[in-house]
Amino acid sequence: MKILGIGDHIDSGASLVEDGRLVAAVNDERLVREKMVFGVPREGIRKILEITGTRPEEIDAVAIATRNQHLVPDYTDFRDGWFGLRRSGFKQVLFDVGSKAARFRKSLPWLEDIYYALRQPAYRKRRSYWPELLENEFGITAPVTFIDHHYTHATSAYYSSDFGENATMITIDGGGDGISAKAFEVRGGRFTELKAVPSFDSLGAFYSYITQVSGFKAGRHEGKITGLAAHGEPIYQDMLDSLLTWEDGGFRNVGNVFFHSAVEEIKSRLPADFDRTDLAASVQKHAERLAVNFTRHWVQHTGFGDVGLAGGLFGNVRINQMIHEIPEVERCFVHPGMSDCGVGVGAALAVYYDREPRPEVDTRCLETVFLGPEFSDEEIEACLKDSDTDYRRPENLEAEVARLLAGGAVVARFDGRMEYGPRALGNRTIMYKPNDPGVNDWLNEALKRTEFMPFAPAVMEEEAERCFHGLEGAERTARFMTITFDCTDWMKQNCPGVVHVDGTARPQIVRKQDNPGFHRIIEEFRALTGLPAIINTSFNIHEEPIVCSPADAVRAFDIGHLDYLAIGPFLAKNPAPIRARERREQGVLSAVDFAEEATG
């Protein structure tokens, strides 16, 4: 049975589930080269059919995430985040009115019902639009089902978790289908909803409000707040708790503020000269406490210590570590496409399993995230020739890359199928040695990034316990770089370029069977340096999506002035690498690199 899964809102995309296995997934941002673009994912659907060789008539069902949502028929950019989004006139009026009316929620509880009732015609328009679009543009006539937003998050996590039949699923995000968080009990493989928190009471939205107040873009830059948090003091926690607090097994917006009014209220309660690092630390601690309370409460209710997480809030790796460390949590798994980039996957899985007779439950719907497009050696070489890039084909590429990394070169890697989800996991990755304590400053500057956390390490599975504490119960999710762990003293001493201020790191644990070539690079690097880890950061230009095609890779390689590009079986050399003269004076580059630069 082939099910096409679709998410048509923020970070829209398409996927294909075949007999319960996720065989392809891609988000349109990678194809149209606009970060977090949303709307009808036409390019994603085309690419999924192409990747899998699926004919339209072979699609048995179409699953679309989120029942109640406005139609966005064309791609809408998200460059300015939620507060700069160009909405339709009617929808913008609803947002503006809702923001102002939020303060009257307690005295006029029916306002919320009216707000959603006014939006129902727009929701119906979207539901009628989709079957016609699929038939007219793609020739797909399979039945179309719309799935509850938070249920898609929960199913994406459960069916990829490797848990047994009993588990607790937790979803927290900004909002979807009028809800911002849900708790589910999974018993015998069947879901029971235990708690739903309205979007008005959204923890994810409050984190975004702080992002906006801090001078960043809500919906895009929450990761910057997470990075800043380690550098500040959480002195505004009480103020935040007076707006959004823990109550009756969920969250409660006791400040009665929403969207514009929330931002205005937060600003009014802060001193004019507030330090945004302190505000970041405050919202991080506040979010950790509320997310941990929510999870622990419902784990204690179900009695099931296997916990699956999905929803945008769980892009916050520090929160995920705190949940993993809850005493009642035995195993913790975060779906690799935890944000709305993964709701189409969850929708397809929900349609596959929620039918009678019900298929036997398999919670390993994916064993790899390499589910996107790939390119032949011929296509890659043609791109290199067209771009007039200096390249060669080494006899042992992985050993050559390891030698370059050991000498201090920055090497990008483009190989095989593109990763699904927000993390680069070896196939669309920039690599560097982990023992340069100043790398966070100069490499981020060179890549024009304004990140505040050190880079993430990719670590051989065989050496993971030498590097991190507390892996037990989160080994699977650590493969996808979705959680932090406390670093060992050895790791802190030997790999300072990847250790956070608080002594944690966000690793990718690399298994040989998951990515043999990437694992071999790290293995060869260890043989040269004694270090079983390398820096792994996403291969992209600032504010652009991770590269998808060979042309994207060559362009990012040139613009970023990276030293080398390992692309397919080829190795390209940049004539103008990052700060080459300054790095050479510091002794960062190897003697071999000096000679290569000198001879051109």
Image (tube, rainbow, N blue to C red):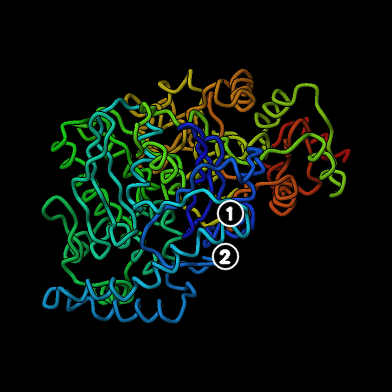
SS at mark 2? loop
Residue 567 in the figure: left or right of residue 211: right
Q: Position of residue 207 (x, y in %)?
A: 33, 59
Quarter of the figure that contains the C terminus: top right
- Per the rendering, the mark at residue 207 is none
Q: At 33% from the left edge and 50% from the top edge, which residue is drawn?
A: 150
- Per the rendering, the mark at residue 28 is 1
Q: Mark 1 or 2 closer to N-term?
A: 1
For the residue carrying disc 1, how many other residues have a C-alpha within 10 Å: few (<14), some (14-19), or many (20+)? many
User: Tag 2: residue type?
Assistant: Tyr
Quarter of the image for residue 590 reads: top right
Q: Which residue is mark 2?
A: 75
Whether label 1 touches label 2, CB < 8 Å = yes
User: Tag 1: residue type?
Assistant: Asp
Which is more toward the observer, 592 or 201? 201
Residue 517 in the figure: left or right of residue 383: left
**Residue 334 visible in the picture:** yes
Q: Position of residue 46 (x, y in %)?
A: 64, 50
- Quick check: 471 above or below 120? above
Q: At 78% from the left edge and 49% from the top edge, which residue is drawn?
A: 576
Which is more toward the observer, 555 or 496? 555
